[in-house]
């Protein structure tokens, strides 16, 4: 059916979008406190920007890319995640230059695309709020970025999100671990899922991340990456843990967590919650000290996270969290008779110009129907405007809760609605 939305997409309708805006605004305010600025990169990128940086053996690149050739035969992909495009932009705009203050802290809010099988919490177009911090390898950066996400969840009133933490160490540590994992998994090769047998050859750490039962069983006693961290990697991880503890941010160590993207090193983390008995990651991120260099910039430390907005909103709903949304209207103008149509327009415009939200009747309906609309729109006050009101230059304004009324001059509404509103409300 071509006249319906594509599979895995959603219309975000006004009642829902009010919640989206609330969460987005809260994120913006929170990020501002941590001195982040907004970045907006294109929705589509050259395929190569994503393919190797995210990892050409990752699920995102092998199975989930929404890619196509454009009319100029360029290989394009809708972005599946935010970090690679931001790093591309960081290098392209020479943000690494010494005159640019470090660290550079940016956030984004926008659509991401992955060709996945749609299900609860999994869409083909979904939305992420993400942050990236460049130029600090200080473990305090890891911790304050995690703390920022934690603060956001706390302010939203979300319960039962658990911070899962792991370290992949530096390149040397990771290579040593990779070998140990190959040695451990190779004898059980036959018991692994088809996908994981392939992963074992291409990207053995991925096996740890598999959701298949047989793979989960196989990796249960796998060696822990933490036993393979060299001194530098151990120190970094120990510092992160100490600082999280100093800030009273609870966490669990999860040595089987490796993340779905290849560019991470040192600290990685996920905030996981349970929805309908299954675990759902709502926010995930970590350190990526090699990515700027990969894009042709100088060696630069990086740390960031991506947070799935649909999943966050799903959790809010499942946990019965009511957001303090204000969908009320300051004034509803009931319009009696077509002769006052233009006067009603002048009135609502004057009220809106003075900073209030106003709605009116446009349809010449009976007064009762108009009052019903005022209630449905949660109007705080109702002004009734008919021919006699216009002639007298006086109208009544009613408090729609207490039903108390007040008569005021039309001019008072036009010139100083704020005082009228304060008196009646
Ligand atoms: P998963 O293991 O659940 O597939 P992922 O490792 O692919 O997650 P990331 O690439 O780290 O996820 O993306 C960060 C966040 O974006 C996820 O934690 C999740 O909240 C959200 N997300 C990822 N894929 C989807 C999707 N298809 N639909 C909705 N949200 C998604
Ligand atoms: Mg995924």
Image (spheres, helix red, strand yellow):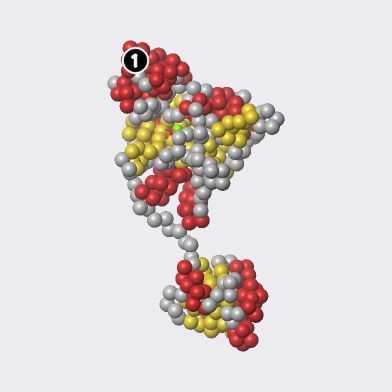
Q: Residue at 43% across / 58% down in the picture?
A: 324
Q: Residue at 53% across / 34% down in the picture?
A: 80
Of residues 11 and 419, which is closer to you in this image? Answer: 11
Of residues 306 and 243, which is closer to you in this image? Answer: 306
Q: Residues within 10 Å of mark 1 (few under 14, many from 20)?
A: few
Quarter of the rendered image showing ligand 2: top left
Q: Which residue is most to the right?
A: 72
List x then y, in percent, for residue 407. Answer: 53, 84
- Residue indicated by mark 1: 190
Q: Quadrant of residue 391?
A: bottom right
List x then y, in percent, for residue 259. Answer: 43, 29
Is 369 placed left or right of 222 in the picture? Answer: right
List x then y, in percent, for residue 350. Answer: 63, 72
Q: Quadrant of residue 146?
A: top left
Is 348 placed left or right of 404 in the picture? Answer: right
Q: Is residue 196 above or below residue 25?
A: above
Q: How many marks overall?
A: 1
Q: Residue at 37% across / 53% down in the picture?
A: 321
């Amino acid at each position: 059916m071509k006249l319906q939305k594509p599979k895995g997409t959603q219309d975000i309708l006004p009642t829902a979008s009010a919640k989206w805006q609330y969460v987005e605004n809260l994120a913006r305010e929170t990020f501002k406190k941590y001195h982040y600025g907004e970045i907006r990169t294109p929705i589509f990128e050259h395929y190569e920007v994503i393919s190797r940086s995210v990892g050409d053996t990752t699920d995102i690149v092998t199975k989930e890319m929404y890619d196509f050739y454009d009319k100029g035969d360029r290989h394009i992909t809708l972005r599946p995640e935010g970090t690679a495009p931001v790093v591309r932009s960081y290098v392209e705009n020479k943000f690494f230059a010494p005159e640019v203050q470090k660290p550079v802290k940016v956030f984004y809010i926008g659509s991401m695309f992955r060709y996945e099988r749609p299900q609860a919490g999994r869409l083909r177009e979904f939305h992420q709020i993400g942050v990236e911090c460049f130029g600090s390898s200080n473990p305090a950066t890891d911790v304050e970025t995690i703390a920022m996400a934690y603060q956001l969840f706390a302010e939203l009133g979300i319960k039962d999100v658990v911070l899962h933490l792991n370290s992949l160490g530096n390149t040397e540590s990771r290579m040593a671990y990779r070998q140990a994992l190959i040695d451990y998994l190779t004898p059980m090769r036959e018991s692994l899922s088809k996908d994981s047998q392939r992963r074992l050859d291409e990207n053995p750490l991925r096996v740890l991340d598999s959701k298949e039962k047989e793979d989960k069983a196989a990796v249960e006693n796998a060696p822990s990456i933490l036993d393979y961290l060299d001194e530098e990697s151990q120190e970094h991880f120990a510092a992160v843990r100490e600082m999280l503890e100093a800030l009273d941010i609870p966490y669990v160590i999860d040595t089987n967590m490796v993340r779905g993207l290849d560019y991470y090193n040192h600290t990685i983390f996920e905030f996981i919650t349970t929805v309908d008995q299954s675990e759902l990651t709502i926010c995930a991120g970590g350190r990526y000290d090699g990515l700027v260099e990969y894009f042709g910039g100088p060696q630069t430390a990086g740390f960031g996270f991506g947070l799935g907005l649909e999943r966050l909103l799903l959790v809010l709903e499942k946990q019965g969290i009511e957001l303090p949304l204000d969908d009320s209207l300051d004034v509803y103008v009931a319009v009696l008779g077509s002769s006052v149509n233009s006067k009603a327009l002048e009135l609502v415009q004057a009220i809106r110009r003075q900073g209030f939200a106003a709605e009116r009747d446009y349809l010449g309906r009976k007064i009762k129907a108009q009052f019903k609309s005022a209630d449905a729109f949660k109007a705080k006050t109702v002004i009734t405007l008919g021919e006699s009101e216009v002639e007298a230059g006086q109208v009544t304004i009613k408090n729609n809760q207490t039903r108390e009324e007040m008569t005021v001059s039309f001019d008072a509404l036009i010139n100083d609605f704020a005082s009228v509103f304060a008196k009646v409300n």
